[in-house]
Amino acid sequence: MNGLENELESLQNEGLERTIRTCSNVPGKPGYTLRKDRLLLNLSSNDYLGLAQHPKIIESMRDVLLLEGAGAGASRLITGNRGPYDRLEESLAAWQNCEAALVFANGYMANSGVIRALAGRGDVVFSDRLNHASIVDGIVMSRAEHARYRHNDMEHLRHLLNKYRDRPRKLIVTDAVFSMDGDQAHLREIAALKREYGAMLMVDEAHSGGVYGVHGEGLCHELGLHDEVDVHMGTFSKSFGVYGAYVTGSRTLIRWLVNKARPLIYSTALPPAIVAGIGIALELVQAGHERRQYLLSASKLFRSSLGNAGFQVAEGNSPIVPVIVGDNHTALRFSEMLETDGIAASAIRPPTVPDGTARIRFSLTEAHTEQELIDAIAKICRVGHQLGVLET
Ligand SMILES: *Cc1c(COP(=O)(O)O)cnc(C)c1O
């Protein structure tokens, strides 16, 4: 087929082919997954607060499913907007202490739709080089200038802001916690630059919503910066354990998005049962301070243990703990050997991460006990020695 087979072959030879494998839920054991009938400790899940199996969420979804049916039947601007949406958006605005909120079908659609709505030809979007692919795609679709700055390099960002200072509309966009590295954006410096240059600021809290802040509001709240952020975005598919995404901000922003965000306008509304489940998840996230504290202390233990063992571990305090291996084949082999040892941990390779930085990306959840993590660390070190990733 026009050379696709050959290209797939070379992807495979370079250790870069991706495949989809089947995993099953293990009822009552949220920290685990089943693959080929084998029980694996799941160190590759984004269900940070262990809510995906929460009985209250499931119950509310079932109740609304019976009342409202399987699908919404139309986009929200037509007849797809049901009661659970309005209630959820009110609660989201109150939670984020801002004027208004808008629910999207998922984070990918929120990011790509919002950026495209806020910037167009002649404008410029300043974006960290390690931002999520959905942000990159939004910028490309917007046709705005893509001013990519080196990861967390504030001097480079300032240089670019200066270079494009006369553009009509300027948008700075960043992940709060970077998804493949687990480190944080320098939000205080970014907010100061945004003010200095009169730009808008959009922050993606996909991996920090639910994890930081007294009520899980995210990193911007934890740092006292939420008033500086014009567009606050997060997903319901990670800490919330469900599916979907939110954008919060001013009434003007939300009114603009209702008119301009194409994924909202031209796509069917999320099923009402999902929206109801998110509503309960939001209550659990807000009340989940102990879950957060445990998650962050377990992450600290896990990160420092692997670092002390000699692995190259990215800095940070998030539940995302990547071990950089470098070579693609070694990363794949590492992941396979961990699976043999009862651990699910994915190898992340280019183009998701820069060339030469293939890694095992561990992500922890509140459902993992300290003993499970200590056992996992011992296994990870053993495999690291066997593969020569750790010196003996
Ligand atoms: C996962 C993720 C998204 C996409 O969210 P989905 O709801 O899964 O589509 C967006 N941004 C970042 C930083 C993410 O990690």
Image (tube, grey):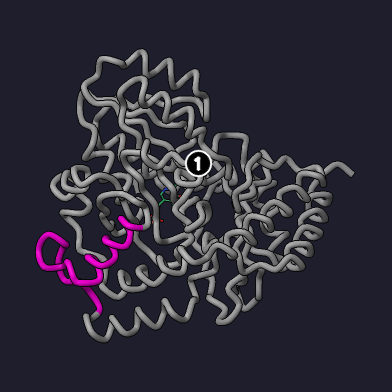
- Residue topped by disc 1: 223
**Where does residue 345 sit, x and y in percent of width and height?**
63, 58
Judge from the rendering whether residue 267 lies leftward or rightward of residue 241; answer left or right. Answer: left
| Residue ID at (68%, 56%) | 297
Answer few, some or many: residues within 10 Å of disc 1's Cα (few below 14, many 20 plus, some between 14 and 19): few
Judge from the rendering whether residue 15 lies leftward or rightward of residue 215; answer left or right. Answer: right
Q: Inspect the magenta stretch and tell me whether residue 88 lies in it.
A: yes
**Residue 275, placed above or below residue 104:** below
| Residue ID at (36%, 73%) | 277
**Where does residue 173 sit, x and y in percent of width and height?**
38, 35
The span shown in magenta is 70-94
Q: Is mark 1 within 8 Å of ligand 1?
A: no
| Residue ID at (47%, 81%) | 55
Q: Inspect the magenta stretch and tell me whether residue 164 lies in it.
A: no
Q: Is residue 389 visible?
A: no
Q: Toward the viewer: 74 or 213? A: 213
| Residue ID at (49%, 50%) | 208
As drawn, which residue projects farthest toward the left? 78
Q: Toward the viewer: 73 or 59? A: 59
The disc labelled 1 sits on which kind of residue? Leu
* Quadrant hosting residue 125: top left
* Quadrant hosting residue 307: top right
Judge from the rendering whether residue 181 lies leftward or rightward of residue 196; answer left or right. Answer: right
